[in-house]
Image: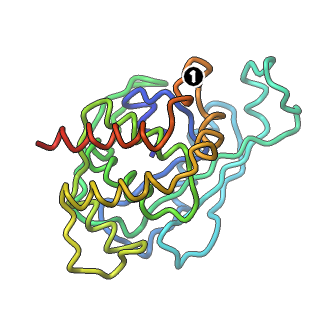
Amino acid sequence: GGTSLRILHGLPRFSEDLDFMLLAPDRTFNWTPYLDALMDTFSTFGIRPEAKPKGDMDKRIRAALIKDTSIAGQLDLAFSDRQPDQKIRIKLEIDVEPPAFSTDTWTFLDFPTDHEVRHQDLASNFALKIHALLCREYLKGRDWYDFSWYVARGVFPNLAHLQAALIQFGPWRGQTDLKVDTAWLTRALGDRIDKVDWEVARTDVRRFLRPDELKSLDLWSARFFAAKLAKLVASAA
């Protein structure tokens, strides 16, 4: 998700939750042992938040919520208008039935200590972002910000992964004869771009950007993203 793009690849925007996916489908997945391990780690830093699974266990996307008030005392939030008794909430979500053909990779990080993170490669991550652009039932400007970011970096989506995701969930669900190639992608994204209310999209993403990024939102329009799409298609040639 957006958090991994920011931490691993320098995406200049913030997120509101943490998204994960299993390496293989597992309907028996339960957040509890992972939350217990997180609580043990938090306790070594003197933080004792609440953590619990959230929502139905029969859903494809399983959620959990971490809530805490004590961490505010360890952070310099003098610039913020937060009330001292307000809770910080972190939402975790995991896909327990991930679509096929994803490719993953490993990255070493050194904060707060040296560790290794397993994550999707950019092409697979971009495929799921395009799935969201085409299938999400509401407009999310962050999706389009990320789309522009991927294109600017010359990333082309993992089309096999995108096709599997489209057949699994969304308007194309169950259409096993669906063939996602560059021509199909061009038509589908072009149609979507023409239907977006770009003022609404700008409003959604604005609060997640640094001040120096806001000016670029003035460019957002069907014409701007049509040019981005053309650049994406050209990169496949």
Q: Is residue 83 left or right of residue 214?
A: right
Residue 7, given in percent of the width and then of the height, sits at 44, 31
Give the quarter of the image for residue 5: top left
Q: Residue furthest left?
A: 237
Quick one: 196 or 223, which is closer to the camera? 223
Residue 208, given in percent of the width and then of the height, sits at 61, 34
Residue that carries the numbered disc 1 in the rendered image: 215
**Way the structure is coloured:** rainbow
Give the quarter of the image for residue 230: top left
Residue at the image point whose x is 45% and y is 53% from the top: 194
> Is label 1 in a helix, a strand or a loop?
helix
Residue 93, given in percent of the width and then of the height, sits at 53, 57
Q: Is residue 169 above or below residue 3?
A: below
Give the quarter of the image for residue 51: bottom right
Q: Is residue 4 left or right of residue 121?
A: right
Q: How many marks?
A: 1
Q: Amino acid at mark 1?
A: Lys
Quick one: 177 or 229, which is closer to the camera? 229
Q: Is residue 27 above or below residue 209?
A: below
Picture quarter with the C terminus: top left
Q: Is residue 186 above or below residue 49?
A: below
Quick one: 139 or 124, which is closer to the camera? 139
Residue at the image point whose x is 49% and y is 24% from the top: 112
Residue at the image point whose x is 34% and y is 38% from the top: 228
Residue 135, given in percent of the width and then of the height, sits at 45, 64
Quick one: 74 or 212, which is closer to the camera? 212
Q: Is residue 173 above or below residue 2?
A: below
